[in-house]
Image (cartoon, rainbow, N blue to C red):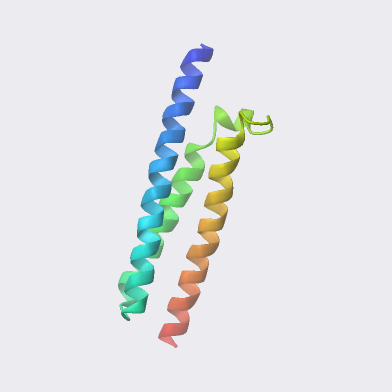
């Protein structure tokens, strides 16, 4: 049973990593679109980034969330959650720039 939980947890962490990479790509796309004045494309990209970040956060949940308080073992879970938090702040900043661009 424990082996099964570990396998599921590793799969979910791998999916979280994929979501974080996709969120990074979407953030870069949003930044580039905003720099070119494409406000709608920037908003769409920031929305995609937010969706991917939230997906990454949920992927770092059970069963590994139980290990989060443990040193070393819980580090990947904490890293995902901290990265998601920073990414969501980046999304909010991007959206604020879009609002400023719209006037």
Q: Is residue 67 left or right of residue 39?
A: right
Q: Disc count in the image?
A: 0
Residue at the image point whose x is 43% and y is 77% from the top: 98
- Tell me where residue 73 sits by quadrant: top right
Q: Position of residue 37 (x, y in %)?
A: 32, 81
Image quadrant holding the C terminus, namely bottom left
Question: Quick check: 92 above or below 8?
Answer: below
Residue at the image point whose x is 45% and y is 24% from the top: 8
Q: Position of residue 36 (x, y in %)?
A: 31, 79
Residue at the image point whose x is 50% and y is 19% from the top: 5
Q: Position of residue 39 (x, y in %)?
A: 34, 77
Question: Quick check: 10 above or below 35?
Answer: above
Question: Quick check: 38 above or below 82?
Answer: below
Q: Is residue 26 left or right of residue 83?
A: left
Residue at the image point whose x is 61% and y is 32% from the top: 74
Q: Is residue 86 left or right of residue 43?
A: right
- Tell me where residue 78 sits by quadrant: top right
Q: Position of residue 29 (x, y in %)?
A: 33, 65
Residue farthest top in this picture? 1
Residue farthest front in this picture? 72
């Amino acid at each position: 049973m424990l082996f099964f939980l570990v396998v599921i947890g590793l799969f979910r962490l791998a999916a979280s990593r994929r979501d974080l990479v996709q969120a990074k790509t979407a953030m870069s796309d949003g930044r580039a679109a905003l720099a070119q004045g494409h406000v709608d494309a920037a908003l769409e990209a920031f929305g995609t980034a937010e969706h991917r970040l939230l997906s990454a956060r949920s992927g770092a949940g059970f069963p590994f969330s139980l290990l989060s308080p443990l040193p070393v073992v819980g580090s990947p879970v904490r890293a995902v959650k901290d990265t998601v938090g920073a990414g969501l702040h980046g999304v909010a900043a991007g959206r604020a720039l879009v609002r400023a661009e719209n006037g």
